[in-house]
Amino acid sequence: MPAVRIRKAEITHAPRLADIAYRAWESGILPILIEREGLRESERRRLARAVGEGWRHAIVAEIDDVAVGWCSRQPRRSYIPYLFVMPEIQGHGVGGLLLERMERMLELEGAARIHLETPADHVRAVRFYEKQGYRILALKPDGRAGRDPFASVYLEKRLSPYDGVIDEE
């Protein structure tokens, strides 16, 4: 696999990030849902809105200057709401690189723990996060109105933020 470059997201990435998110959702999460009319378009709009609102807090993985994945965090929190990688690139370490970089950024800000969640039935994602050092804290129902009821796994990873003085000599 060619070299992966990770950098801060820019507004010009937004359409591509929304497409990556939708394609990853379509291949990983849609199969565990009961499909109903309008579900796909509704999710496409939701993910585009999420990118539009959160791109300032996102990082992008690129291969040959093409975005292939992204990860974002919520401002002022140690919570990662989104990590998406193109389905055809999954399994090649891109998600791990994105997650590790976001963890380091949060750790430098003093975060002692990071939280995230994923659908409980998305076994591949749950296993991925466990391999990255996350542990399951809770199982919670998804209470969003108009959605098929399913449970989310709430995960946590403990960090070791440095709180000493950096000698500049």
Image (cartoon, rainbow, N blue to C red):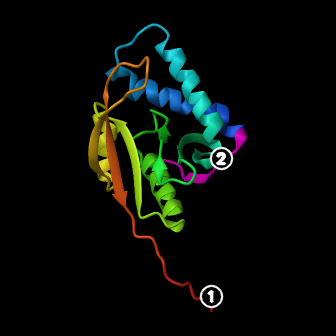
Mark drawn on residue 74 = none
The structure residue drawn at horizontal position 58% and vertical position 88%, both measured from the top left corner, is 167
Q: Which residues are magenta?
A: 1-11
Identified by mark 2, the residue type is Arg
Residue 64 coordinates in the image, percent (x, y): 62, 45
Q: Is residue 120 placed above or below 63 in the rendered structure?
A: above
Q: Residue furthest top?
A: 37
The structure residue drawn at horizontal position 51% and vertical position 53%, both measured from the top left corner, is 77
Tell me if 82 is positioned left or right of 60 in this view.
Answer: left
Q: Is residue 8 placed above or below 81 in the rendered structure?
A: below
The quadrant where residue 14 appears: top right
* Residue beneath disc 1: 168
Is residue 146 visible from the viewing direction of this image? Answer: yes
Residue 94 coordinates in the image, percent (x, y): 47, 47
* Residue beneath disc 2: 56
- The answer to the question of whether label 1 and label 2 lie on touching residues, with beta carbons closer than 8 A, is no
Q: Dot 2 lies on which element?
A: helix
Residue 95 coordinates in the image, percent (x, y): 44, 46
Tell me if 123 is positioned left or right of 12 in this view.
Answer: left
Tell me if 118 is positioned left or right of 161 in this view.
Answer: left
Identified by mark 1, the residue type is Glu
| Crowding at mark 1 (Cα within 10 Å: few <14, some 14-19, many 20+) | few
What whole-number distance in Å separates the C-alpha atoms at marks 1 and 2? 30 Å
Is residue 91 visible from the viewing direction of this image? Answer: no
